[in-house]
Image: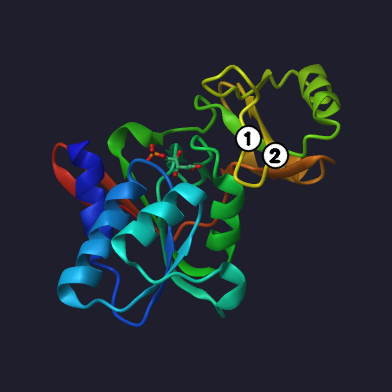
Amino acid sequence: MELKKAVGLKAAEYIKSGMIVGLGTGSTAYYFVEEIGRRVKEEGLEVTGVTTSIRTKEQALSLGIPLKNIDDVTHVDITVDGADEISTDFHGIKGGGGAHLIEKIVASNSKEIIWIVDDSKMVDKLGAFPLPLEVIKYGSQQVFNHLEEKGYKPAFRMDEAGGKYLTDEDNYIIDLHLGTIENPTALEAELNQMVGVVEHGLFLNMVTRVLVGSADGVQDIA
Ligand code: 5RP
């Protein structure tokens, strides 16, 4: 928890008044959003937030951070978000929290993207963390079957009540238990073309800065 907080606070140092800021989702981004809220309240920081999930929107509103919808801004200056895995070539898997669709939309409209992670998220190759796919409900069993035939070891994500997990956009998530992704670019191209898959959690060539928290402190490695 301390490492997550440390990287969240460090990332907040990049935020200046006047910026439009993408507010990520998850237990690490939580600390960044808290710090932005504190600075808005105590230091008069003037920013506009664009949130990446209902959870983050509720948090930001409770902190008094002014918000706009992604469609009501011309761009986003910096998005700060967590990640589930980051490879040595700075590709990432996101969506462990089920928010990767909106996270990717916000990130795609951002001039700068900062990922904040603890050092347990840094890997040689992606894939040990299950790769999330957000899928339209209609025909989702067919998508699942197709993925199973390909040997991608799919599993519908379930919620605490034992039903299928629903995203903010009311879609399902299928997690792929791939083990290792040898060629993320090829997999991305394949998933981009799969009918019924709204968005996958591969974030390739997107991040501009990575802040990693470890026992030695916070390192800026990209
Ligand atoms: C949510 C995400 C999160 O950024 C990712 O799961 C990391 O979360 P945490 O900081 O809680 O480990 O992609 O969809």
The image quarter in which residue 38 lies: bottom left
Depth check: give the residue in front, 145 or 124: 145
Query: What residue sits 67% from the left and 39% below the top?
Result: 134
Quarter of the image with the C terminus is: bottom left
Q: Using residue 76 as the reference point, say whether residue 136 is left or right of it.
A: right
What secondary structure is marked by label 1?
loop
Q: Position of residue 81 (x, y in %)?
A: 41, 52
Q: Position of residue 95 (x, y in %)?
A: 53, 39
Quarter of the image with the N terminus is: top left
Q: Amino acid at mark 2?
A: Asn
> Quick check: can you spot residue 80?
yes
The image quarter in which residue 105 lies: bottom right
Query: Which colouring convention does the figure follow?
Result: rainbow
Crowding around mark 2 (Cα neighbors within 10 Å: few <14, some 14 to 19, many 20+) is some
Q: Amino acid at mark 1?
A: Leu
* Residue, disc 1: 166
Crowding around mark 1 (Cα neighbors within 10 Å: few <14, some 14 to 19, many 20+) is some
* Residue, disc 2: 171
As drawn, 11 above or below 73: above
Q: Position of residue 56 (x, y in %)?
A: 42, 52
What secondary structure is marked by label 2?
loop
Query: What residue sits 55% from the left and 69% below the top?
Result: 69
Query: What residue sits 26% from the left and 42% below the top?
Result: 4
As drawn, 85 above or below 37: above
The answer to whether the beta carbon of the residue marked 2 is less than 8 Å from any atom of ligand 1 is no
Disc 1 from disc 2: Cα separation: 5 Å
Q: Are marks 1 and 2 in contact (CB under 8 Å)?
A: yes
> Quick check: can you spot residue 90?
no
As drawn, 177 above or below 221: above
- Considering only order in the chain, which callout, 2 or 1, is on the residue closer to the N terminus? 1
